[in-house]
Amino acid sequence: MCTQACFTTRQSACCNRDGIATFFAHVVIHAVLSSGEDLGVLRNTLERDPGGFKGVYLGEKGCLWRLKPIVCEMFLCDRAKASVLDKDKALRDLWEGLLLKEKQFTWPDKPILFDAL
């Protein structure tokens, strides 16, 4: 759905170079987990980005990050959420529980996982 609705039409509001709130630790973890080739692909993609295409981190095979930042993993636009969660209350409840767990790692009023790393 995401590819059809946003990526191929270049209407994505997510996944842009400046829009993803990445911590320095995300970049370090990505670099440690990636091969030199992976890092080269990401660097070349960012160097060629004209600034208008919102999905700069998306390639033909999906996300260019080896380990996506949590803000990406937990992001679903309203249309994607509705297409799945409106059909299944149990799934909606599970999603809401995951959102509460996400706060354990991202809530800004206490140290988070990446601060300790």
Image: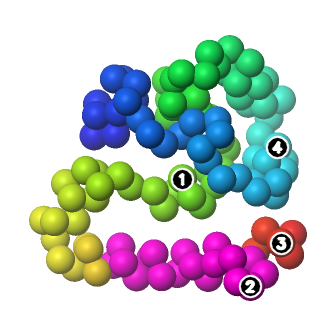
Helix or strand or loop: what does disc 4 sit on?
A: helix
Q: Compared with residue 114, is residue 27 higher up or lower down, i.e. above or below?
A: above
Pointer 2 residue:
110
| Mark closer to the chain start, 2 or 3 | 2
| Mark closer to the chain start, 1 or 2 | 1
What number is the disc on residue 31?
Answer: 4
- Magenta range is 94-112
Pointer 3 residue:
115
Helix or strand or loop: what does disc 1 sit on?
A: helix
Task: Tell me if mark 2 has few (under 14), some (14-19) or many (20+) residues whose alpha carbon lies within 10 angstroms of its own.
Answer: few
Pointer 1 residue:
72
Q: Where is residue 80 in the image (x, y as percent from the top left)?
A: 28, 51
Q: Residue at x 76, y 25 (%)?
A: 43
**Cα gap from disc 3 to disc 4, whole angstroms:** 17 Å
Q: Nearer the viewer, mark 1 or mark 2?
A: 2
Q: Where is residue 45 in the image (x, y as percent from the top left)?
A: 67, 21
Q: Which residue is drawn at 82% across and 54% down?
A: 24
